[in-house]
Amino acid sequence: MGKRALRARMQKLFMEDFTARDIAEPLLSLDGDSSVADALDLMNDRDIRAVGVRDAGEVAGFLTREDSTEGSCRDGMHSFETATVLAEATPLREVFEALDTSPICFVSILGGPAAVVVREDIQKPPVRMWLFGLIAIMEMNLGRELEERYPEASWREVLSPGRFDKALELLAERSRRNQLVRLSDCLQFTDKAQILVKDPEVLKEAGFSSKKEALRAIKDLQSLRNNLAHGQDILSYDWNTILELSRRLDRIVSRI
C-alpha cells in the first residue's frame, strides 16, 4: 500500500469508522402508564442512567435517575427535543464533544432514538483501541521527526544523562535478543516528545503556545497511555486529555 493510500485509509479509520453505534447501549423503555417509581427501579436494577417512555407503542420521551418518583412515566417524561440526539454514524470525536456538554446522549437508529451513550461508555474496548491507535501514530511520528531533526543521534546532547543511559540499557537488552533497532527506538514516548518541544518550530507546528503547555500535554498523554495499556480507568482522570486528543485528530492523522 502506497503512502497516500495508507494515509487515506488511516484518515477514514480514525475519523469515520469508529462511531457512536460502537459504544451505544440499547435504550430500554417502559409503557407511558407505568409509574416513574417503576422506571427508577429499572434504572437502579440495570445500573443505567436513562430509559425511554413509550406512547402508542413508540418511544416518545425519556426519564433519568434524577427525575421525581411521583406520577406516571407519560406525565413525567422529557421530550427528546430537550436532549442531545446523535446519528448512529456519528464519529467518536463528535460523540466526545457531545458528552462534554451533556452526560447522556441518545442515538437515533432507523429514524428514532433507540440507544444511549454516557461518559462511562468511553471505558469500552472500541474507544480504548481508537485512543491507543492514535497515541501509537503520535509516537511513530515523534520518532520520524526526531530522526529528521537530530540525525545520527545528535539528540543525545539535549537529553538528560539519566534518560540517555536508560536508552543505552534498553538498546543493549534488545541487541542481546537479536532485535535490530536504533538507539532512538529505545527512547520512551516522553523522551522523544520532551526533546522535540525544545524546538520552537516543533511547538508551532504542533499548535502549542508554549513549552510549558506542551510539557503538560505530554505528561497527560503519558498518563492516558499507561492507563490504556494497563486496563485502568480512563474517565476519572483522562477525560480532558481524551477531548484534546480527539480535537487534534486531523493534525495527528495528517502526519502519517
Image (spheres, rainbow, N blue to C red):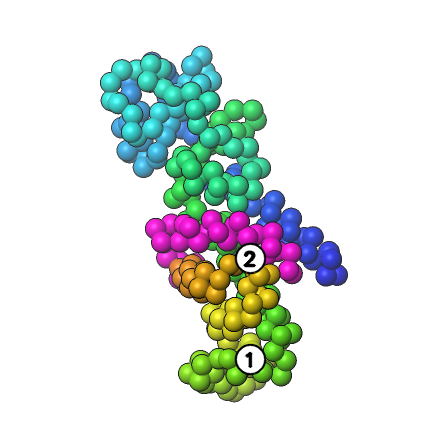
Q: Position of residue 255 (x, y in %)?
A: 64, 60
Locate residue 7, reporting x and y percent.
Answer: 68, 56
Q: What mark, if any, has residue 207 been given in the picture?
A: 2
* Residue under numbered circle 1: 155
Query: Residue 254 at x, y = what percent?
Result: 65, 56
Dot placed on the residue nearer the N-terminal end, 2 or 1 = 1
- Residue lying at 29% horizontally and 29% vertically, measured from the top left: 66
Asked whether disc 2 touches disc 1, contact meaning CB atoms under 8 Å apart, the reply is: no
Label 1 residue SS:
helix
User: Secondary structure beneath disc 2?
Assistant: loop
Residue 227 shown in magenta: no
Q: Residue at x 44, y 18 (%)?
A: 60
Residue at x-position 56% and y-position 42%: 91
Q: Is residue 89 above or below residue 71?
A: below
Does 253 appear in magenta? yes
Whole-angstrom CA distance, mark 2 to mark 1, is 22 Å
Q: Nearer the viewer, mark 2 or mark 1?
A: 2
Range shown magenta: 228-256
